[in-house]
Amino acid sequence: MAPIAALLLLLLLAASGPLRPMLSGAAPLEPVAVSLLAGAQEKGAVCLDGTPPGYHLQRGSGDGSGSWLLHLEGGGWCSTLKDCSGRRMSVLGSSNFMKPLQFAGHGIFDSDEIYNPDFYNWNKVYVRYCDGASFAGDAEGQAQDGTTVYFRGLRIYEAVIGELMEKGLANATQVLFTGCSAGGLATILHCDDFSARFPQQVSVKCFADAGFFLDVKDISGERSFWSFYNRVVQLQNVRQVLHKDCLANKDPTECFFPTELIKSIRTPMFILNSAYDSWQIQNVLLPSSSSPEKSWLSCKDNIGNCNSTQIKVLDEIRNTMINDLKVINDKAEWGMFIDSCFTHCQTLFRISWSSPTSPRLGNKNIAKVVGDWYFGRSQGVKEIDCEYPCNPTCNSLPPP
């Protein structure tokens, strides 16, 4: 089976973090500078190319000065030495390419109280992703040119959290630990470990956006995404972060999927995902290795082009996700927002996070539902949308 990693290279351009360097039309605020991890080489906490990892820290104010929001960036994975070596020439593998980011107008990072009423004045940290394995690996390899490729995501996670603790995180009164896509998976992987670093009286919760990746067969009947994850797990040695109770009964690769991970997480968590996740439809169900027919290529680009037979296949993917999430119903402090929009990552854009045209479930947008869950303003914050195309509030979202 040809590796589906080639498809993931799209993320090098399209999803190397939805927060971009200064965007035209953004609010006229200063971009947030990159802070490079101190002593990275000594700690072995380095990007794929050996450069120190980075993060962006914006200090909170007023009654938010003791509250912290930490977000782990996404950007796919690399499963071979060749692919990981290639990422070293991009922001997904080297801090040499990291630039200041504009937080204004970017969803949960927005400092505008109108669009981000619950978290606008919190300390906000955007941790850059440069290891290729959801901040989970600890190994190294040798590229064809003889240079070392460093798989140090776990050390990056630990070292960055340690440095932030020294910068005030240790004194936080409430914390929200988040991530999107591969960063959403990282949030799920590290949730309990992160929470355990704080005293019990501190409110620590986790929030995974578009990180609920499914173990489903592609359109040709192959488990190509499982095979891809298996290569990531083996190449980057992610076993250390996998839950021991899962490893006792299952293959490590199965334990890398959220379906298994959420079963043993104790920390309150919120799952935000589309049941028709555009990235998963394009890369898990319809990878190039599955040789989809021409009609599927049109459907793959835009769910509006899918015929009724194809929609039934997508509905099966939705049903798998809903079924895998049933365990959350027994977790009183957990929440979820599962919409039917053809999209991927919804927290980092104002149009999807909180705007007059944001997706809604139960007449509430994502920002409202997440805030109600975090602050306990509502009980049983678990929203699941009907099947596509039932939700008209999805129509305002731009193409993925």
Image (cartoon, rainbow, N blue to C red):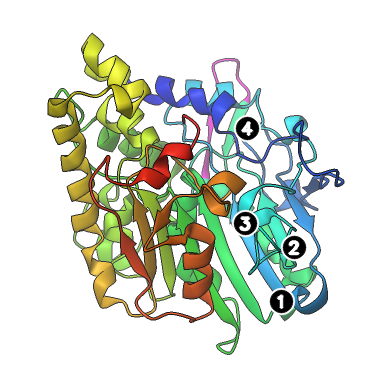
Q: Is residue 142 visible?
A: no
Q: Which residue is mark 2?
A: 163
**Residue 329 horizontal/vertical position (percent):** 25, 72
- Secondary-structure class at tag 3: helix
In primary-sequence order, the first of circles 3 and 4 is 4
Q: Which residue is mark 1?
A: 170
**Residue 336 horizontal/vertical position (percent):** 37, 63
Cα distance, mark 2 to mark 1?
10 Å
- Secondary-structure class at tag 2: helix
In primary-sequence order, the first of circles 2 and 3 is 3
Q: Residues within 10 Å of mark 2 (few under 14, many from 20)?
A: some
Instruction: Give the residue at x 67% y 43%.
Output: 46
Q: Give the mark toward the camera: 2 or 3.
A: 3
Q: Which residue is mark 4?
A: 93
Cα distance, mark 3 to mark 4?
25 Å
| Three-letter residue code for mark 3 | Ile
